[in-house]
Structure formats: structure tokens, C-alpha cells
């Protein structure tokens, strides 16, 4: 049976390989600035926007897609397509390649990681497709605009809040970190340390990595509770881990002894704003999804034929008991 | 012939597989309390006919009547519900389950709490087994049993179904003479209680002993029906084969040469004793070049275990005694070691341990001798094909193309492939374990012819078999084992099957009526 | 012993037998059987044709068959394809290797650490990384062949171990690969591998995949080892009794699989300019899917590398056409799942034996 199968399969491989032979050398780079505006056909045009999402399994990123979808609904000229890379850099590269093949009018990308996606983003940009990068940056400057939060700033705000509001007289803090190796994790940590510096009586007595996950946060907190008899504040790099930590403390009856803070403040039923409203978390800090802002930027580029800022940083907001209900309602105008 | 109470009447049965007629216009009846033997070479249509009767094959031509009522079966379970049970040649047992669990598989006995009532199942299984004359612990996993014992379990299982029609497809192929006798007692008992039995076998003498009527099929067609007690074996065989019987088969007499293998007081103390396994416990024997030495013994006498030890595949244990090959003592370490010393082995169960059934004849033939067909691990197809064809010719293998799956061959030709593989390693000594089991009579003759030829070339053969006529007819000498020891050695020139059997059973055993033409 | 020994020459050996045997050998064959044998190749053709039909068009051109897109398709399958070739070997002996994705991550990290952080040269780095994969696979082979642990368990453990090693080696960080001759830069020669195409012709990863696939097909055709491999997978007991070095075959097969996973890891690192300890998560399942679609039986002993190549390409074409049509990612998962089940179901329908 191998007699026949070999040539057949070889032919199949060969056909595909040969088909790939026409690939152009993409090292030549035309003028990207001019290219961006080429796409602008004003209000009468129809535009296809490709959105490449790193991973919709994270609630934050699903919300980002939802925000883009909702915002695009108000722009009849826009049709947005979504792709999910499922946390795989290689898959996201392929997703962007496919958008290039489809010749989308604008690319929005929320990269899984910076380095692996830099080349393919540049390729799209060099082909004249305007590129909006959300949340995580790529390297270099081969994109039209970056819209994102500032994780260092968020960490600093959280640190300050803990040092000034929660522990003015000092106390013990444990830190639940995000996935080791992830940039936001490093930046939130860095900002946090800067934020608590003002109050030397605030001590970080332990840190553990919860990989952004609620169940991991809970398990890590179980261990931290055993090891540390006195914990005053739990600073978590995101809301799900903070909720997990709260559950762990509750399980041993110590949830009243300490306060919990998170980051992200997603305006969804399982998100941090609700947790603050319901008293489980003392505070959380918004990490904007940038969805609305991305569509606004796209509109400016494609319909208004205008230009946008290369970098647009969205600032964080403190959510505590005083404003949680109101902000949740603002973010969900339709209930 | 009692045509009065036809329990089963099959008429005009036909079945095609592709272009091949497996059955063509066959009429077959079975009376209540009748043992009806079904004869024919492999591929004659016996199995297909019985698969139709047992509901295994549902698309066929013709009609089946049960008690005069036309019936069609949706499947084997349906047929079973109507009292038709079949004991398959391929033992359909679950190795991991116990004997009792297997017997009651799918109809487990329950306690009032609806849980499985193990105790009752074990008790009833024990009773059933004893009725079939077997002493087996019903709690033992079937996978630990030897093929013969497994066969007895399937028979017990079939009997437990309280079937009115019982189809036995070669039930004795792995049984020793004593067990066969016990089985016949059970069959006679069943017959008295009105059960109709279809008995498929290759062994003429069994049929003469147990059957009331015999039907011969050839190439999917009915040939003749006769009273088995009246026809000679030669006549039956002629009907089966469709040609006159040639002659008595005789291996050429060869002068045997120097001593090839000497086993002195070989004993194995197993690291972990396994139930039902009989390791060598003091065996001495020798095989000369060009000599065919038989190994006789009852089931569990340790024949297979001795061959496995010589081939180096027995489970580990402390070995005492000596194994001397051509004057040099060897410690068998495994198949590669044995093969490199010129020892070849044809295992008992060619499907489970001999062949890859869904691989080609070629691949199965050359697998032991691959380095011979190329250099640096690269095979020259031309060479391996040439070697395979040479062997196929020499063994008169009947096949279509070398690329065909070995599983498409008949049992006898499959066995020839195992032989061919071993012969390609150019062995000096061949260890054969039941080489003719489940092999049709024609192929059997060819295997005997081959053994004679090999002996003529100076190859020594150690042949373990349960078939006494085979041992007496083929071997120069027969060593009888009992309980892991050699208890007697006979020259076949001046002793017969009775002598072997008596030695195998030992003085204490009751000497039952031993049939067979002596 | 008795009187027999002083009569070494048999007086007569005889047994009753008959004339010419009439056993018939049926040869399997026919059109249907042929169709089944090349199932994955026909499947690939069918999906390819479907892709052309359902491809979005722009300015009259079929996007799917554009040169750029086809290059993307084959490049996207190359890593999975390389792994799947190794996986085919393992599955052919009736085993499974769940560690390949983690070994890919380990190798990607290894390449980056050695070249960027330790400033090793290209050749020593590649050789060491490949050796790590080879040894890792061989150890798994030893555990399954000599200790007798099922390969599923061994490689499940291996997955954890490789992932852990990758995290330790990289300090849990993705390590970016920059090129140049300075310190903490990978040699430019490595960047040639990373060039998206080779001489403007074939994407490099595809070239590597093609070489691996052709080598594997040739290897399975001509080597004695491949016969042993099929025999072990077909009937291990029979293979052992036939004198096949079963342990050696198993260890070698797992070693090859580990080596190819490491090779895929190097390709991965160079394509993405980064080695991250989380790379390759779930790749083992994609590789198994390619092997199964390619018609290799998980029971062992039956299948081919050519089928696997077709299976991997089929998955790649499928992924691509679904993406080009912007099928919702959740629906894509359903469709891919159904394709795998359909391929397996076809296996069951295959005629003979």
C-alpha cells in the first residue's frame, strides 16, 4: 500500500510547496503613513475590520471583543470580524496572515505576546493596512496606534491606596501575582512597589503566583494563610485571584481580618465591580478594555480620514464601595 | 437416521462474500438428541453455515425452521434467546475477568439488592465446570489459563445457557485426550436430555466416537451425509478433499547425526509462582541432528514451559541443570539470543503470538531474518521478496500476492508462514508447540512432509503435541512429561499411542476407554 | 531413560494424510479497499477542492489559492507536521506521546537561552537542543519499554517534567531573540532560518517539514528498523518471539519523537523570535489528530507517515478556510472535532481484517 501512497502524498506536499513559491519578499517597505490614509474612503465606504484576539477564555478579553462589537454597531459602515488565537502565538500569527490575505481595511490586534507578533504586525502595516494595537504592545513602531492602559500606573494607584487608605498605620500585605513571565504581571508588581514606598510601615510579607486564575489564587492563598498568622491586606494582580483568595480566607473564617483588592474591574456580573459592590473586595482598579476607543480611532482613520495619536493611554479609575453601583450601571446602559 | 423430530431444518442456504460462494444451496437438519458432525476442510463453509444458524450472519439466502416454524434471527443474542448457542473456535472470553464472571457475562446473577452475587456465581460456575470434568478455580482470571483450559470454560459457558441447540466449532483442538473423553461424557449426557449438537472437527476418530450422523461440505456445497461408524477414515477424507487419499505419509528415514541438544536435569524455581504454570522440575532429554523428538503429556505437564525455557522466554526464576547445545552449555536469554544460536521456535497460538494478522505475508515472513536482505539497515526489496518466494515455494504456500494480509490465509497456510519465518533464520534446532492445531488436513500433511525434509537436512526438531497419532507418526522418539518431569521415553518404532497415554497419565490415573485405531 | 536411546535411527515415521491441499488464499483488494487506504489523501483533496469552492474572492481572484495564502497554510502546519511525523512512529508501535508540546516549549526556550543569554554559536546550540529532545524521548522510551509503564502515563509525566524544565531554564520568562553579532544576540545565520521564505521561494519551516517527512517516508520504506517497528505495533508478543529487539525499537522510537519535537521547537522559536516556556501547549493533541486523520491506527501496527502528512495538511487547509470565511472560533472548534470523529469513523468502516 505504501507503493502508491508515497507518490500521492509527495505530490500533495510538492503542490503546496510549489504553490507557496510565489511569496513576495516583504522586506521592502513602502511609506506606511501614506498607506494608512489610502484606505480612507469617507462615510460612503464600506469597511471590513479584522480583530485578532489573543485568547477569549479570559473574561477581560471576551469583554474587549464585546465592547468592540457594541461600539461597531453604531457605525453602519463597519463590519468587524473576530479571530481567537487561544493563547498560541503561532495561531495568532496565522490569524493575522489570514486577515492580510482577506485584505481587511483595518486590523485591530490584542497580542498574546509582543515579540512573536512584531513581524506579522509589521507585515500588515507595510502592506498598507492601518493597525491598532490594544492592551499589549508590539516592538518597534510599525503600527498606526497603540491604545492601552498603563499597568505601572495601575500598580502604583493600588499601592498608594493600600498605603494611604487601607493601612495608614502600616501592616502586612501579601501579593498574588499574575502568570510569571507576563508583562502586565511585572509592571503591576513594579508599580505596586513604588506605590507603597511612601509608607515604610507597610510590609510585603509574602508573594505567590496565581497565574491569573481564580482557583490558583485560592490554592495559593490557602498556603499563605497557613504560613502567615497575621495578614492585613491581600493585593491581587486581578479580580478573579482576589475572589479566590477571599474564598480561601472565608473557608478558615479569617475573611474579616483582612482586606482584598483586585485589578481589572470588569463591568460584568462575575467581575470585580460587583465584588466591590457586594463587599468582598475593598477596591479594584479599572483596566480599560479599549474596545470603544479602538472603534473610535478606526472611525477617525477610515471615515474621517484623520490621524490619531501614536500612543493613547487610558487611565485607571478606583472603584470602591462609594462608586461601584453607579459605574456598573454606566458601563451597562442596557441593563 | 432419526428424521422424525427435526429440531432444526436449514434448506437452500446460500451466502456470498464478494465473488466467493461460502455456502451454496445447503440443506442441513438436526434432530433433538442428535450429534451431527460437520466435516470439511478449512474454507468448506462449515463456519459460515453455523454462523448463519447462530445468528452471527443475518443476510443469507434460504430458510431456517426451528421446531417446524420458520425463523429469522436479528443477531446472536436473538438466536441464544431461542436456545441456539455456539462455542466459537476463537475463544470469546474476556481475559481480565474471572472464570465465573466470563461464564455469566451479560447475565450476571444478582442479589436481592441488585448487586452482583459473586458467591452464587462462583458456586454455580464450579458446579458447571465439574460437570464438564474440569477442576478450575472459578475465581481465576481467564487470561491466566492455558488455551485448553479456556476452551473448557467456553464449553461450560455454553452448557450453562441450557441451549436446545449447541454448536461446537472444534471444541477439542487444545484439549488432551483425557479432557476430550470427559467432554464426550458431557456430550452424551446432553444428547440424552434431548439437546441437538452440531459438532465440527478435523479429527476423524472423535467423530466416529461421538457423532450419530456426519455431513461433509466442500467448497460451500453439500457433498454427502453418512453414518460415521460405517465409513473408513480414508473414505471420509476422500469426500472432504474430493480426491483419493494418496498413501500413508512417511517421512524419509534419515540417519541421525551427532547430539545437538542435551538437557540435563533442567529445573526452574520461579521467582513468582504462577497458578496453572508448570515449570520444568527436573527434565533430561536429548535431540540429535536430523532427529524428530516428540514431547507428550497431559495439559499442564509442562511441555510449553519447557520449550519456552529453551527459547529463553519463560518468566524469570532460578535455573538449575544444564542446557547444552552442540557440546557448549548455553543460558537462553531471549529470542534473539536463541535465534543467534540456531534455535527457532513456533509458538502454540499463532494468532496471539505468532503473526501480525493484518500485516502482509512478506512482512511476517522476513521479520526474523531482516539483516540478511540488506546492508546498514537498508532492506533490498528484491532480496526479501526472493527469500519469501523461495520459502513459499518450498512450503507450498497457497497465496495470492506477497502483499496480502496474512490474516486472509487459511490456518494451515498461516502456520506455514510462521515456519517460513523460522526457516529463514537457518536454525539447527526447531522447537514446535502444537504446530498443527487448527490446521486442515491437507496443510497438516505438508507440515509433516516439511518436518521430514528438515530432519533430512540435519535439523533437530523438538515437537510438543497433544495429538498422539501425530507424535507416533512423525517422531523418531517421544519423551513423555508429567508434572514438569520426564517420565518416559519411547521409540515410535516399537510403541504406540496407548503406551504414551499410559505414561502421560501415570500409574495412579484410571485408564479410561481410549479410542483410536491401534 | 528407556530403550529408545540406543535406537537413534527411526524405523518408520508415518501418519495418515491426504493428497493435494486445497487451501485457498483470498487476496484483499478492490476499489473500495483502495479508497479507504488512501482515505487521508482523498480527504485532503476533498477539503482542498471545498476550500477553493468556498473561498472568499476579491476582484475575481480566489483568495485561498493565492500564493501568499498557500504559503501561509503550509507554514502554519509545519510545526505540527514535524511533531506528527514523530508521533506517527510512536503510535505505530501502539504507544502515545503526550509530551511533545512541552518538549517543543523546552526546545524553544533552550534555543533562546543558549543563543541569546549564553551566547553560544548556532551549531552547538542546535545540536544541544536536539540532543536534549533525543535524550528526553529516549528516557521516556526506557521507562515504558524496560519498566513497563504505559506510554500514556510516562509521557503524561514527561509533559509535566518538560514544562517544568522549560520554566526553570527560562526563569518563567519568554526570552526574546534578537539578531546580530553583539553580546546577547543570536547569530545572523540563525535569522536565515527565521526568514519567512528561503530565497523568496519556500518558507523555511515548510522546507524542514518536507525534508523530515520525505526522510521518514523513505526510512519506513527501506529500513529493517521500520519492519521491526510495525511488527512491535502489530503484535508485540509475536514480534518478541520472532527475535525483534522490542526494547531497542521502543526506546529508539520515543527518542526519534523527542528529537523531532525539539526540532519543531527550534523552528517555533525562530518563527516567533522568542522562546517561551508556555510554547506548544496542546500541540500534542493537534499532532495526534493529524495522525488519526492520516489513517494510522491508535492500536498500532497500521498506518503511514504519508497519511499523517496528508492529515496535517488537511487540518491546515481546514483551519485556513474556516478563518478566511471568518467562521466563529467556537464553531471552528466544533467543525474540527467533527472532522476528527469522521476520520476515525471511516477507519472503522474500512473493509477486511
Image: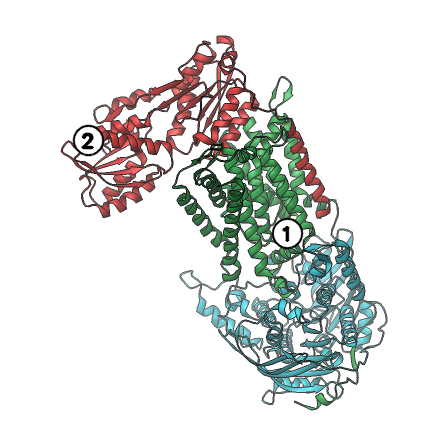
Chain colours: A red, B cyan, C green
Q: Position of residue B288 (x, y in %)?
A: 72, 81
Above-or-below relation of B163 to C6: above
Above-or-below relation of A303 to A102: above
Q: Is residue B408 visible?
A: no
Q: In the structure shown, which secondary structural element does the residue marked by tag 2 occupy?
A: helix
Q: Give me the chain letter of mark 1.
A: C
Question: Which residue is pictured at 39% across the width and 22% down the height?
Answer: A67
* Residue tagged 1: C302
Q: Quadrant of the N terminus of chain B?
A: bottom right
Query: Does C219 sit left or right of B39 as displayed?
Result: left
Q: Nearer the viewer, residue B235 or C11?
A: C11
Q: Nearer the viewer, residue A289 or A29?
A: A29
Q: In the structure shown, which secondary structural element does the residue marked by tag 1 occupy?
A: loop
Label 2 packing within 10 angstroms: few (<14), some (14-19), many (20+): many
Query: Does B220 sit left or right of A31 as displayed?
Result: right
Judge if badges 1 and 2 mark residues of a common chain.
Answer: no
Amino acid at each position: 500500500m505504501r507503493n502508491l501512497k508515497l507518490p500521492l502524498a509527495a505530490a500533495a506536499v510538492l503542490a503546496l510547496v510549489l504553490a507557496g513559491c510565489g511569496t513576495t519578499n516583504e522586506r521592502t517597505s513602502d511609506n506606511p503613513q501614506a498607506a494608512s490614509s489610502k484606505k480612507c474612503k469617507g462615510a460612503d465606504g464600506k469597511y471590513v475590520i479584522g480583530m485578532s484576539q489573543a485568547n477569549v477564555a479570559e473574561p477581560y478579553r471576551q469583554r474587549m471583543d464585546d465592547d468592540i462589537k457594541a461600539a461597531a454597531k453604531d457605525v453602519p459602515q463597519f463590519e468587524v470580524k473576530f479571530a481567537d488565537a487561544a493563547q498560541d502565538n503561532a495561531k495568532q500569527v496565522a490569524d493575522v496572515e489570514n486577515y492580510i490575505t482577506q485584505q481587511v481595511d483595518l486590523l485591530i490586534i490584542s497580542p498574546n505576546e509582543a515579540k512573536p507578533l512584531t513581524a506579522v504586525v509589521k507585515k500588515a502595516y507595510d502592506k498598507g493596512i492601518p493597525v491598532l494595537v490594544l492592551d499589549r504592545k508590539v516592538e518597534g513602531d510599525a503600527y498606526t496606534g497603540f491604545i492601552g492602559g498603563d499597568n505601572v500606573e495601575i500598580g502604583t494607584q493600588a499601592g498608594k491606596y493600600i498605603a494611604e487608605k487601607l493601612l495608614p498605620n502600616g501592616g502586612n500585605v501579601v501579593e498574588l501575582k499574575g502568570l510569571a513571565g507576563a508583562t502586565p504581571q511585572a509592571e503591576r508588581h513594579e508599580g505596586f512597589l513604588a506605590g507603597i514606598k511612601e509608607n515604610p510601615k507597610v510590609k510585603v510579607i509574602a508573594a505567590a503566583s496565581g497565574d491569573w486564575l481564580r482557583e490558583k489564587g485560592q490554592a495559593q492563598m490557602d498556603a499563605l494563610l497557613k504560613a502567615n498568622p497575621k495578614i492585613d491586606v491581600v493585593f491581587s494582580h486581578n479580580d478573579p485571584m482576589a475572589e479566590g483568595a477571599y474564598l480561601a480566607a472565608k473557608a478558615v473564617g479569617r475573611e474579616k481580618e483582612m482586606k482584598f483588592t483586585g485589578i481589572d474591574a470588569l463591568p460584568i456580573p462575575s467581575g470585580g465591580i460587583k465584588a466591590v459592590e457586594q463587599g468582598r473586595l475593598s477596591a479594584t482598579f479599572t483596566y480599560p478594555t479599549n474596545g470603544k476607543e479602538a472603534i473610535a480611532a478606526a472611525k477617525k482613520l477610515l471615515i474621517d480620514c484623520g490621524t490619531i495619536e501614536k500612543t493613547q493611554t487610558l487611565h485607571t479609575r478606583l472603584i470602591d464601595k462609594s462608586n461601584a453601583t453607579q459605574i456598573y450601571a454606566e458601563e451597562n446602559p442596557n441593563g | 437416521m432419526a428424521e422424525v423430530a427435526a429440531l432444526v431444518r436449514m434448506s437452500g442456504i446460500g451466502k456470498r462474500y464478494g465473488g466467493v460462494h461460502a455456502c451454496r444451496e445447503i440443506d442441513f437438519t438436526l434432530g433433538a438428541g442428535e450429534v451431527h458432525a460437520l466435516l470439511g476442510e478449512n474454507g468448506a463453509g462449515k463456519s459460515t453455515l453455523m454462523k448463519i444458524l447462530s445468528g452471527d450472519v443475518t443476510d443469507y439466502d434460504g430458510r431456517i425452521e426451528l421446531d417446524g416454524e420458520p425463523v429469522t434471527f436479528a443477531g446472536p443474542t436473538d438466536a441464544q434467546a431461542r436456545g441456539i448457542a455456539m462455542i466459537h473456535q476463537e475463544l470469546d472470553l474476556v481475559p481480565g475477568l474471572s472464570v465465573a464472571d466470563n461464564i455469566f457475562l451479560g447475565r450476571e446473577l444478582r442479589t436481592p439488592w441488585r448487586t452482583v452475587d459473586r458467591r452464587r456465581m462462583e458456586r454455580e460456575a464450579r458446579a458447571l465446570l465439574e460437570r464438564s470434568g474440569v477442576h478450575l478455580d472459578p475465581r481465576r482470571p481467564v487470561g491466566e489459563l492455558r488455551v485448553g483450559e479456556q476452551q473448557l470454560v467456553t464449553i461450560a459457558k455454553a452448557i450453562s445457557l441450557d441451549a436446545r441447540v449447541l454448536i461446537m466449532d472444534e471444541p477439542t483442538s487444545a484439549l488432551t485426550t483425557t479432557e476430550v473423553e470427559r467432554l464426550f461424557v458431557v456430550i452424551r449426557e446432553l444428547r440424552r436430555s434431548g439437546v441437538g449438537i452440531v459438532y465440527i472437527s478435523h479429527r476423524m476418530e472423535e467423530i466416529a466416537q461421538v457423532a450419530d450422523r456426519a455431513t461433509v461440505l466442500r467448497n460451500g456445497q453439500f457433498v454427502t451425509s453418512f453414518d460415521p461408524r460405517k465409513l473408513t477414515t480414508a473414505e471420509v477424507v476422500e469426500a472432504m478433499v474430493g480426491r483419493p487419499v494418496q498413501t500413508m505419509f512417511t517421512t524419509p528415514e534419515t540417519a541421525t547425526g551427532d547430539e545437538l541438544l542435551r538437557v540435563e536435569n533442567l529445573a526452574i524455581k520461579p521467582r513468582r509462582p504462577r497458578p496453572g504454570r508448570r515449570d520444568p522440575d527436573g527434565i533430561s532429554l536429548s535431540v540429535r541432528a536430523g532427529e524428530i523428538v516428540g514431547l507428550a503429556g497431559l495439559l499442564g505437564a509442562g511441555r510449553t514451559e519447557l520449550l519456552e525455557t529453551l527459547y529463553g522466554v519463560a518468566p524469570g526464576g532460578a535455573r538449575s541443570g544444564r542446557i547444552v547445545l552442540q557440546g557448549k552449555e548455553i543460558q537462553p536469554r531471549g529470542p534473539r539470543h536463541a535465534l543467534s544460536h540456531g534455535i527457532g521456535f513456533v509458538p502454540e497460538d499463532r494468532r496471539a503470538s505468532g503473526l501480525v494478522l493484518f500485516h502482509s505475508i512478506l512482512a511476517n515472513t522476513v521479520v526474523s531474518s531482516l539483516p540478511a536482505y540488506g546492508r546498514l539497515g537498508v532492506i533490498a526489496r528484491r532480496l526479501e521478496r526472493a527469500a519469501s518466494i523461495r520459502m513459499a515455494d518450498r512450503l507450498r504456500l497457497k497465496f495470492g500476492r506477497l502483499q496480502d494480509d496474512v490474516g486472509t490465509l487459511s490456518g494451515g497456510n498461516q502456520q506455514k508462514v510462521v515456519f517460513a519465518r523460522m526457516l529463514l533464520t537457518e536454525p539447527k534446532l526447531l522447537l514446535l508447540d502444537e504446530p498443527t492445531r487448527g490446521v486442515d488436513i491437507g496443510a497438516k500433511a505438508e507440515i509433516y512432509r516439511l518436518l521430514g525434509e528438515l530432519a533430512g537436512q540435519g535439523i533437530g526438531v523438538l515437537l510438543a503435541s497433544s495429538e498422539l497419532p501425530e507424535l507416533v507418526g512423525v517422531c523418531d522418539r517421544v519423551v513423555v512429561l508429567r508434572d514438569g518431569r520426564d517420565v518416559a521415553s519411547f521409540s515410535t518404532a516399537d510403541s504406540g499411542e496407548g503406551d504414551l497415554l499410559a505414561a502421560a497419565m501415570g500409574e495412579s490415573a484410571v485408564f479410561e476407554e481410549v479410542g483410536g485405531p491401534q | 531413560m528407556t530403550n529408545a536411546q540406543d535406537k537413534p535411527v527411526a524405523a518408520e515415521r508415518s501418519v495418515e494424510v491426504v493428497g493435494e491441499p486445497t487451501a485457498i488464499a483470498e487476496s484483499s483488494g478492490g476499489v473500495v479497499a483502495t479508497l479507504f487506504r488512501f482515505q487521508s489523501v482523498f480527504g485532503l483533496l476533498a477539503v482542498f477542492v471545498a476550500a477553493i469552492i468556498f473561498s472568499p474572492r476579491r476582484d475575481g481572484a480566489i483568495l485561498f489559492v493565492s500564493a501568499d495564502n498557500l504559503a501561509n497554510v503550509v507554514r502554519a502546519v509545519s510545526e505540527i507536521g514535524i511533531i506528527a511525523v514523530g508521533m506517527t512512529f510512536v503510535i505505530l508501535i501502539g504507544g502515545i506521546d503526550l509530551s511533545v508540546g512541552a518538549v517543543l516549549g523546552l526546545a524553544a526556550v533552550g534555543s533562546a537561552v543558549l543563543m541569546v543569554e549564553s551566547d553560544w554559536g548556532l551549531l552547538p546550540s542546535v545540536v544541544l537542543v536536539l540532543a536534549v529532545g533525543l535524550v528526553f524521548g529516549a528516557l521516556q522510551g526506557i521507562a515504558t519499554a524496560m519498566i513497563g509503564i504505559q506510554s500514556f502515563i510516562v509521557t503524561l509525566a514527561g509533559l509535566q517534567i518538560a514544562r517544568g524544565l522549560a520554566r526553570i531554564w527560562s526563569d518563567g520568562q519568554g526570552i526574546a531573540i534578537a539578531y546580530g553579532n553583539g553580546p546577547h544576540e543570536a547569530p545572523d545565520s540563525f535569522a536565515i532560518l527565521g526568514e519567512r521564505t528561503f530565497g523568496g521561494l519556500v518558507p523555511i519551516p515548510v522546507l524542514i517539514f518536507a525534508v523530515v517527512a520525505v526522510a521518514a517516508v523513505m526510512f519506513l520504506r527501506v529500513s529493517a528498523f521500520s519492519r521491526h517497528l510495525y511488527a512491535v505495533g502489530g503484535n508485540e508478543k509475536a514480534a518478541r518471539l520472532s527475535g525483534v529487539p522490542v526494547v531497542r525499537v521502543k526506546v529508539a522510537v520515543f527518542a526519534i519523537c523527542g528529537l523531532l519535537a525539539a526540532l519543531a521547537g527550534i523552528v517555533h522559536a525562530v518563527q516567533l523570535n522568542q522562546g517561551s516556556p508556555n510554547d506548544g501547549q496542546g500541540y500534542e493533541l493537534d499532532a495526534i489528530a493529524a495522525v488519526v486523520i492520516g489513517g494510522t491506527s491508535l492500536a498500532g501496527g497500521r498506518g503511514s507517515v504519508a497519511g499523517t502528512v496528508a492529515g496535517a495538511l488537511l487540518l491546515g487547509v481546514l483551519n485556513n478556510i474556516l478563518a478566511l470565511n471568518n467562521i466563529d472560533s467556537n464553531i471552528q472548534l466544533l467543525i474540527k472535532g467533527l472532522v476528527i470523529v469522521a476520520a476515525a469513523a471511516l477507519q472503522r468502516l474500512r473493509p477486511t481484517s
